[in-house]
Image (cartoon, helix red, strand yellow):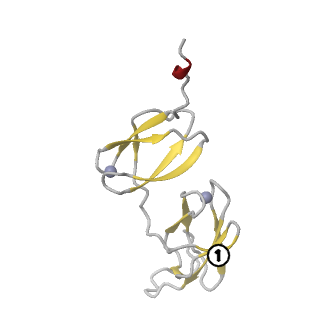
């Protein structure tokens, strides 16, 4: 046997972009969890969830559903603040600066410092909300 047949090249994973249908390859992540990617064809932001079942030609979907509230600014390790104010009872999300996962933000109270945690890596996002200027939501409604 030739020694050069030792496979030192990392395994690759072939992905299919759900937005544009394009195919591309990445180095197969060795750890399970969420990964933030860009489609090289259409530049869509993509979230790849690596599980033991992830295999070639997995369809990767774009990550944007809710509006991104704003850019998280670092306060200290694993703690970030978003300066832009949310509007109460409107769903937003933040993109975790540490792992690229979506962090759901649902502000339920105005004027208070609110926190949300990344489910993937436990980074913390701090933000504040203001009252809905439309004032459509009756006080005390549970969402
Ligand atoms: Zn694409
Ligand atoms: Zn994270």
Q: Nearer the viewer, residue 17 or 91?
A: 17
Query: Where in the figure is residue 32, as x and y percent of width and height?
Result: 60, 42
Q: Residue furthest right?
A: 77
Vertical placement of 137 versus 21: above or below?
A: below
Q: Nearer the viewer, residue 130 or 84?
A: 84
- Which image quarter holds the C terminus? bottom right
Q: Looking at the picture, does residue 1 appear above or below residue 110?
A: above
Q: Within the image, what quadrant is residue 111 found in?
A: bottom right
Does mark 1 have its CB less than 8 Å from ligand 2? no
* Residue 12 image position (x, y, % from top left): 47, 35
Left or right for 78, reference 58: right
Residue 90 placement (x, y as % from top left) = 49, 73
- Which quadrant: the N terminus? top right
Which quadrant of the figure shows ligand 2? bottom right
In the displayed orientation, state which residue is furthest to the top: 1
- Residue at figure coordinates x 55%, y 30% from the top left: 8
Residue 63 lies, with reference to residue 142, above or below; the image says above
The residue lying at 58 percent from left, 57 percent from top is 99
Total numbered labels placed on residues in the image = 1
| Residue of label 1 | 114
Q: How would you rate the neighbour count of disc 1 (Cα within 10 Å): few for under 14, some for 14-19, many for 20 or more? A: some
Of the pair 89 and 28, the residue shown nearer to us: 28
């Amino acid at each position: 046997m030739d020694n050069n047949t030792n496979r030192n090249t990392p395994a690759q994973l072939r992905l299919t972009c759900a937005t544009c249908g394009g195919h591309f390859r990445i180095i197969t992540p060795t750890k399970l969890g969420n990964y933030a990617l860009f489609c090289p064809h259409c530049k869509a932001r993509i979230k790849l969830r690596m599980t033991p079942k992830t295999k070639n030609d997995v369809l990767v979907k774009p990550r944007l559903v809710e509006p991104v509230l704003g850019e998280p600014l670092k306060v200290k390790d694993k703690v970030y603040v978003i300066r832009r104010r949310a509007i109460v009872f409107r769903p937003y999300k933040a993109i975790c600066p540490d792992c690229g996962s979506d962090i759901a933000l649902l502000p339920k109270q105005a004027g208070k410092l609110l926190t949300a945690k990344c489910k993937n890596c436990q980074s913390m996002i701090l933000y504040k909300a203001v009252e809905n200027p439309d004032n459509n939501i009756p006080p005390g409604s549970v969402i």
